[in-house]
Image (cartoon, rainbow, N blue to C red):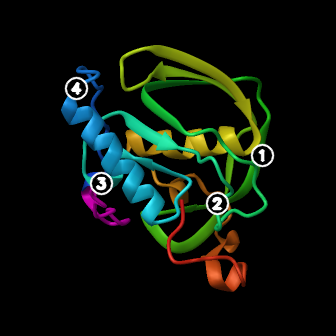
Amino acid sequence: MTVREILKMGDPRLLRVAQPVTAFDSDELHLLITDMLDTMRAASGAGLAAPQIGVDLQLVIFGSNARNPRYPDRPVVPPTVLINPVLTPLGDEQESDWEGCLSVPGLRGVVPRWSRLHYSGYDQYGDPFERTVDGFHARVVQHECDHLIGKLYPMRMQDFTQFGYTDVLFPGIAADEDD
């Protein structure tokens, strides 16, 4: 329906802690989700959190039915609407890998994340669901949910020698925006 403006690093609204969604299956919520999907697709993102478009709610979307041109070697993650998420790491193992973000356009950095996790929450209708995931799926969920607590991926980085412009680090990969 509408492609919304994506807030960029430096905007103080990205540092807020989002509020829980309390009204499910409403016209307002469905419109917000549609706008988020349109915005994510227009930017070729792998995910988008409501705070990234200035909406202070615990709502993230991620995944796609097709490969993302900015992450051509990554597996497909199922399209998901996740509301009021709870993430539980499974074990102590972490993996470090490259991430980008629509709110940090044109840059990528190496970020440590839990290798496996269980997440639960609600869909747009208020129905509870849960999944146990690993790899890229687990990374995407953690990245998007960080936006709900006011964290951007550079805040999680441990080595800033592994941070730079996408077109320099990965020539040939679409680098307009990342997520």
SS state under label 4: loop
Q: Earlier in the sequence, mark 3 or mark 4?
A: 4
| Distance CA(mark 2)–CA(mark 1) | 21 Å
The earlier-in-sequence mark between 4 and 1 is: 4
Element under label 2? loop
Front-most of 13 and 160?
13
Neighbourhood count class around disc 3 (C-alpha, 10 Å): few under 14, some 14–19, many 20 upward: many
Q: Which residues are magenta?
A: 1-12
Whether 88 is drawn above or below 49: the answer is above
Q: Is residue 52 a member of the stretch shown in magenta?
A: no
Labels 2 & 3 near each other (Cβ < 8 A): no
- Is residue 84 rendered to the left or right of residue 80? left
Residue 5 belongs to the span the image colors magenta: yes
Q: Which residue is mark 2?
A: 68
Q: What residue sits right under mark 3 in the picture?
A: 53
Q: Earlier in the sequence, mark 2 or mark 3?
A: 3
Prevailing SS of the magenta stretch:
loop
Q: Position of residue 130 (x, y in %)?
A: 58, 18
